[in-house]
Amino acid sequence: MEIRLNGESRFIDKVTKMSVAGLLEMEQVTSPEMVAVQLNGEIVDQGTYHNTMIVDRNEVDFLYFMAGG
Amino acid sequence: MPLTEKQQERYSRHLILQEVGPEGQEKLLHAKVLVIGTGGLGSPNSLYLTAAGVGTVGIVDADVVDSSNLQRQIAHSTKDLDRPKVESAAEKMRALNPDVEVKPYKLYINAKNINEIIREYDFVIDGSDNFETKFLVNDACVLAGIPYSHGGILRFKGQTMTVLPGQTACYRCSFREPPPNPVGCSRAGILGAVAGMLGTIQAAEALKFITGAGTLLTNTLLTFDAATMDFRKVPLKKRSDCPVCGENPTICTLEVHAKAAGDSLP
């Protein structure tokens, strides 16, 4: 499937869907609690990362929490 | 009040901008902007807002200048070590532009004092260095209806958005709750100039808001990575289920912030 991840096209081989948790793992996001995930413009509830599926042509944005000032 | 001859000279590069001009400059001279935090983001914000002739610039910080600050916090000098940050910054600001009234607040902003302070201002800049304060500033500004600029930096990256309460997405619309074990600049590091990059974007937003020039970073999270110099605008939405600006808000006072700080509101 092909998705847009953080504004860039991304081809993911051999699968037709993937959970948000799976994508975070594939992208080696080491601290998922430091990311707000936006799927097709909607914020995904952190408690549903394993059940929320990403499919072909979806748009995903990782919004990182940044505390520094 | 029309601009004096000295002001016409000082602000001449604003005056020749069609989008600012004498009218915009007069608006700036009558405007009041509060900068929360006088560190990496607060320094460039305070200095550029002062240089631009914003009538009143408030600065809030309880800390003193530490030598590890000097790599990026350009309002402070080596001779200012151990001085209160607001005192050190206020000195530079007053030297830069005598047109500006500088109001230093040497305190930690909290649920008890934030309302009284922000309500004196037209626009607020968040330059704080922790999530407790970032969420407090968002909630207080949303509840009081005061436009503000969110800013955050870490390592080589920065993010900012401008919030017009009740009209556009707020910080909590996307970032629901402070994360449990946050990593800050003291542990993760920060490339010094990144603070300047992000802070000056916030200052530009404040100047645009006051003068009405251009288009604000509303419903948008601007993010950049200085390692690659990739800039991106992520479209955001105002959420009807946002806990503070949504249709059935669960945060209607700052009590939740007072409780988190082990305090209570009167």
Image (tube, coloured by chain):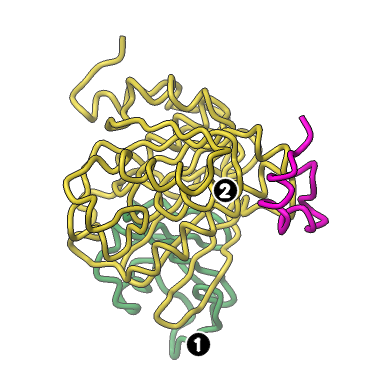
Q: Which mark is residue A11?
A: 1
Rendering coords of residue B136 (x, y %): 37, 34
Q: Quadrant of residue B164?
A: top right
CA gap, disc 1 to disc 2? 33 Å
Q: Chain of mark 2?
A: B
Along the line of sight, the residue nearer the viewer: A33 or B186: B186
State yes or no: residue A42 in magenta: no
Residue that appears at 54% across and 78% down: A3
In this image, B81 relative to A57: left or right? left
Foreground mark, 1 or 2, reads: 2
Chain B rendering hue: yellow
As shown in the figure, which amino acid type bears the numbered disc 1?
A: Phe
As shown in the figure, which amino acid type bears the numbered disc 2?
A: Thr
> Which chain appears green?
A
Residue that appears at 54% across and 47% down: B49
Q: Which mark is residue B44?
A: none
B154 in relation to A46, above or below: below
Which element carries disc 2, helix, strand or loop? strand
Residue that appears at 53% across and 40% down: B98
Q: Chain of mark 1?
A: A
Q: Which mark is residue B162?
A: 2
In the image, the segment drawn in magenta is: B1-24
State yes or no: residue B15 in magenta: yes
B266 in relation to A62, above or below: above
Along the line of sight, the residue nearer the viewer: B247 or B98: B98
Tell me if label 1 and label 2 are in contact, CB under 8 Å. no
Q: Quadrant of residue B186?
A: bottom left
Which element carries disc 1, helix, strand or loop? strand
Rendering coords of residue B31 (x, y %): 62, 34
Number of labels in the image equals 2
